[in-house]
Structure formats: structure tokens, C-alpha cells
Image (cartoon, rainbow, N blue to C red):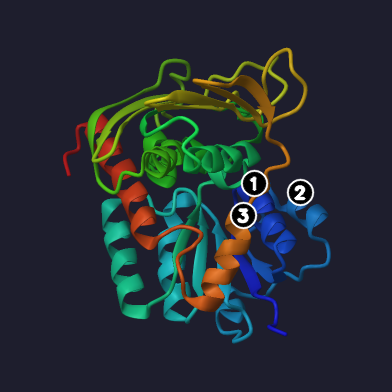
Amino acid sequence: MTAPLRFAAIGIDHRHIYGMAANLIAAGADFAGWWTQGHPNTEDGFVARFPDVPRAASAEDLLSDPTIGLIVLSGIPRDRAAWAVQAMAAGKDVLSDKPGCTTSAQLKTIRASVARTGRIWSVNFSERFEVPAATRAAELVAEGAIGRVIQTLGIGPHRLNRATRPDWFFDRAAYGGILTDIASHQIDQFLFFTGSTSAEVTLAQVANYANPDDPGLQDFGEIALKGDRGHGYIRVDWYTPDALPTWGDGRLTILGTEGYIELRKYVDIGHAGTDHLILVNGTRCERIDASDAGLPFFARLINDIRDRTETAMTQAHVFQVCDLALRAQSMAEGLGE
């Protein structure tokens, strides 16, 4: 019998670490340990969820442990690239929270590290990988339920939750900008569902409309993309009202030549639960409960680490998502390439 994959976490500054760790465990991996700088405001929640996982004395203790095959990163975004390079140099594969990097220079360094070490550098695009409705949508698209996909419309509204946010959340250099950060989810979905392997950014804008006392925060962003196999439009923001019963009404519309799919991922007013999928084509017009569709990414990643394959997500796809997000951010801010 093959021994389970052992993984460790370095940095727990973003709550996405909860889902990343829990889904790896559910897929059969062992959580070997964790280390983080200081005591971020996520720590109490993390310890409550994983009380039996030991805190290492140092990150080096985890990186030097030959039984650990995967390092999971959810520290401050600007720090993740350096930790990824260090982990790959230590012979570990990497799963990073998004954004996996915050500058084009960091992405260049990561590319070189992957080429040099042969390790896997993956990014957890949770708005696809942790959403059962996205799994079901992928199955329907693969079956030809809406013909050829030609466009995605993705929105990623978020609640600001100001009282719980650390200082780095309001620091543009620390989080990388709203398009680098949040919009990477929607760029991933655009590339995946259209099947595009290359794309250009034709529109990119960012703004701060509602938080003038926090000049480092971008609370609105939008992108238009033209790919080799389709088009995409993306809108992200920090405007989710307090009355909504979840952190954001994330949606994705997938337009095909023979129909369309709409995902209302986390909430649909008037309907209980999550993972609402609406399918309309020549013979079907229905709402589907997709909450039982599963989350195959994590098991596939574990298999890829064992078999050195690319069934969860190709390395080229990860690089392309991050490159487009960084290009969009630069265009929006007038920084050039």
C-alpha cells in the first residue's frame, strides 16, 4: 500500500488555509505540521479546526523533513513566492493560496525554480476547486451540453469585514492589487471553460470608490479578455452588503453556442443552500442542485505528486493565470509590462 502524502503549512495569514488543509485531509493526505510568522488573527480558528496538528519550531524544520512531500502556503501574499522557491529547492511540491505571486519578477523566479527543480507549483483557485457546482459545470461542458463555450462572465463580490482584516490587507504592495488577487479566480475559470491556452487583456480597471481613508485598498476591478478560444469579462469588488447571508454572491455564466450554464455558487435569494446550477439548452431548462458533485482537484493533486502527472491542473495553466492577472493589474494601474 502506498503511504499517504504528508503535507505541511507555512503561513496561515489567510483563512483559505482552512479549506486547503481540510480538503487535502479529506482526499487522504496527512497534515504533518505547520509554522507561521507571529500570531495572525486566523490562528485561533486554525487551531480549533486542526487541534492535533503540531506547530513546528521553525519553517526549516518542515522543509528539511524528508517525509513531507507538499508545502501549503497561505501567508501574506507578497511572501508566498519566496517561500515557494525555498520549498521547491528543498525538494517539495507547493500548493499556494491565491495569489501565488504579486509581481512579474516573482513569477519569473517561480518559473525558473520549477524548470530547475522539476517540482509542482500549484495555486488553489478555490472559486473553482472548492465549489461542487463548478465540478458539475465542467462535466456538462465536457458532455457538450451547451456546445462550444465562447464566453465566460465571472463576478467575485466580497464582503470587506473591515474589523477582522489585518494591516496587510490594506497595503497594495502586500496583497498585490485586486486583479492580481481576487480576479485570478475568474481568470482561471475563463481559461478552463473556454479551453483557451493564450489570451490578451483588452480592458483592465481598478478603483477605490467606497474606502477613501484606505488609499492602498482597491475595492473595484474589472477585466475583459480575448483568448484563442473565447472571450471573458470579469468584475470583482469589496461591496457585499451586510444583509447577504454569506461573504459574496459569486456567480459564473458560461455561454456556449447551443446554450448556457449559470452558477450561483454560494447563495441564490429565495432558494436554500449553495451550488445552484442553471442549465438552458435546446432540450433542457432547469435548475440543478450541484452540491453533491464533489471536489476532485485535491485527490488529483495528490495523485500528480505521486505520479508526476498533470491531471489536477497543468503547470502551463497556472503560469498563464498568474501572468494574465499581473498583466491586467499593470494595465489598470498604468504601470506597463
Question: Vertical placement of 30 versus 282: above or below?
Answer: below
Residue 279 percent across, percent down from the top left: 56, 24
Q: According to the image, label 2 marks what residue?
A: 45
Residue 297 seen by the camera: yes
Report how far apart the C-alphas of labels 2 and 3 lie in the structure. 25 Å
The disc, 2 or 3, on the residue closer to the chain's N-terminal end is 2
Q: Nearer the viewer, residue 30 or 170?
A: 30
Q: Nearer the viewer, mark 2 or mark 3?
A: 3
Circle 1: element type:
loop
Pointer 1 local density, CA inside 10 Å: few below 14, some 14–19, many at least 20: some
Pointer 3 local density, CA inside 10 Å: few below 14, some 14–19, many at least 20: some
Q: Residue at x 62, y 36 (%)?
A: 133
Residue 262 falls in which quadrant of the image?
Answer: top right
Residue 290 percent across, percent down from the top left: 68, 35
Report how far apart the C-alphas of labels 1 and 2 lie in the structure. 9 Å
Residue 147 percent across, percent down from the top left: 41, 32
Question: Vertical placement of 245 versus 270: above or below?
Answer: below
**Looking at numbered disc 1 in the image, what kind of residue is underneath it?**
Arg
Residue 269 percent across, percent down from the top left: 69, 14
Circle 1/circle 2 CB separation < 8 Å: yes
- The disc at residue 296 is 3
For the N terminus, which image quadrant?
Answer: bottom right
